[in-house]
Image (cartoon, helix red, strand yellow):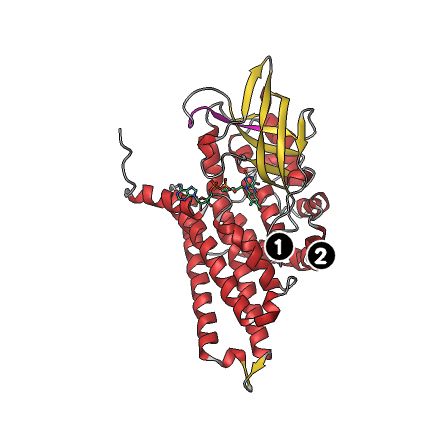
Amino acid sequence: MILTQEHKEIKRTVRNFVENEINPHIEQWEKDGIFPAKELFKKMGDLGLLGISKPESAGGMGLDFSYEMAAAEEFGGITCGGVPMAIGVQTCMATPALAQFGSEYVQQTFLAPAVAGDMVAAIAVSEPGAGSDVAAITTTATKDGDDYIINGSKMWITNATQADFVCLLANTSDDKPHKNKSLIVVPTNLEGISFSEKLDKLGMRSSDTAQIFFDNVRVPQKNLIGTEGAGFMMQMMQFQKERMYVAAMSLKGMELCINSTIEYTRERKTFGQPIIDNQVVHFRLAELQTEVEALRCMTYQACEGFLQGEDMTRLASMAKLKSGRLSREVTDACLQYWGGMGFMWDNVVSRLYRDNRLGSIGGGADEIMIGIICKYMDILPKKRK
Ligand SMILES: Cc1cc2nc3c(=O)[nH]c(=O)nc-3n(C[C@H](O)[C@H](O)[C@H](O)COP(=O)(O)OP(=O)(O)OC[C@H]3O[C@@H](n4cnc5c(N)ncnc54)[C@H](O)[C@@H]3O)c2cc1C
């Protein structure tokens, strides 16, 4: 994927925004356990950064997904995982289906304000009893007059306590699990919706995560995205963009760890020489950077295929898998070279060590990615009749 002048401009805009409007506040937001999504997203909306690949009719830039990936890479330069994850939810996880399948009403009422930064979005798929096994969700949306009545609950929802709407996956019939689901836009101020306390997490401290409860919540049927019963398929498509975003975003975070470790080990001396002068250390850092470059190639190759209209499920799953695993390897290896300083809570490497642990779990765990790759390799054992 060749970066055009326009890609470079977007990257420069994001880099400046991260440096000036985000990174100076990270320490505080991490301490607060939340970042001001509405305030930050409004600033981003004003710069067009929330609608890079969204249609111009909804206020977006109408560019292809490669520009979203270029921006994602720069958001990875944020010195924590929570804020770039929340931005990714807004741009590449909770809104792609609205842009691709949403009616004019859905696009103007929800997508356009999300692009402008006037509404915060969340994606509500996982449930207390169904994370990896999306088909097993039990939240229902039952027709009643012109409305759906929603009952159930959604677990670990990013942006939940600040969200204006969720893109909800719910069962709308008793058909087979892959044919009975629909995506519905649900405003969060409706009667019958309540939230748990903000969940206390190992990492991603500045991102708010909560459980959402739906008790006979009445939503107009016109909030349906696309066709009823096609929700599972649409969500699987939405997951592809999520996984590509996650892979692209992880690159700069890993480089941040490698580069700050280079700086630290150049300064810090043991036995009369800088730590980095030990071959085991500089070799390891070079190996890790090589792995990051390999992931960068794979991620952009997946994006290139997507732009050509190919099915990118296999490569996007590989990129997501590699990103999760490599993020763990890089942060662990770098933390080691910081010694006791690496074990301190506010050190950027230790923060990314905690935050990046989610990469192998959220948005499809490593094992789920491997299962998809096996399916594409046709090596999954056949189901017994
Ligand atoms: C901080 C955070 C933010 C999140 N944000 C969102 C959000 O915004 N929206 C949303 O919908 N969800 C969100 N999630 C949920 C996340 O996507 C799920 O946690 C994830 O999909 C895994 O589901 P689970 O936790 O139920 O794990 P389970 O499905 O219970 O699986 C547990 C573990 O078992 C293993 N496993 C599972 N199935 C298999 C298998 N077939 N073969 C081998 N091993 C297997 C995996 O190692 C997996 O990690 C978030 C989670 C966290 C922690």
Q: Tag 2 or tag 1, which sits nearer the N-term?
A: 1
Q: Magenta part of the protein: which range? A: 178-184
Which residue is at the front of the view, 28 or 271?
271
Q: Give the residue at mark 1.
A: 14
Mark 2, secondary structure of its residue: helix
Q: Residue type at mark 1: give it.
A: Val
Three-letter amino acid code at disc 2?
A: His
In the rendered image, residue 194, in percent from the top left (x then y), is placed at 67, 31
Using the image, determine if residue 107 lies above or below residue 67.
Answer: above
Q: Residues within 10 Å of mark 2 (few under 14, many from 20)?
A: few
Q: Give neighbour class at mark 1: few <14, some 14-19, many 20+ (Cα, 10 Å).
A: many
Image position of 60 with respect to 222: above or below = below
Image mark for residue 307? none
Question: In the figure, is residue 227 to the left or right of 86?
Answer: left
13 or 81, which is in the foreground? Answer: 81
Taking the view exactly as shown, the residue that stands out farthest to the bottom is 272
Residue situated in front as seen by the camera: 121 or 69: 121
Q: Is residue 70 visible?
A: no
Q: Quadrant location of residue 143?
A: top right
Rendered residue at 66%/55% (across/down): 17
Quarter of the figure with residue 63: top right
- Residue 25: image tag: 2
Q: Classify 320 as above or below 125.
A: below
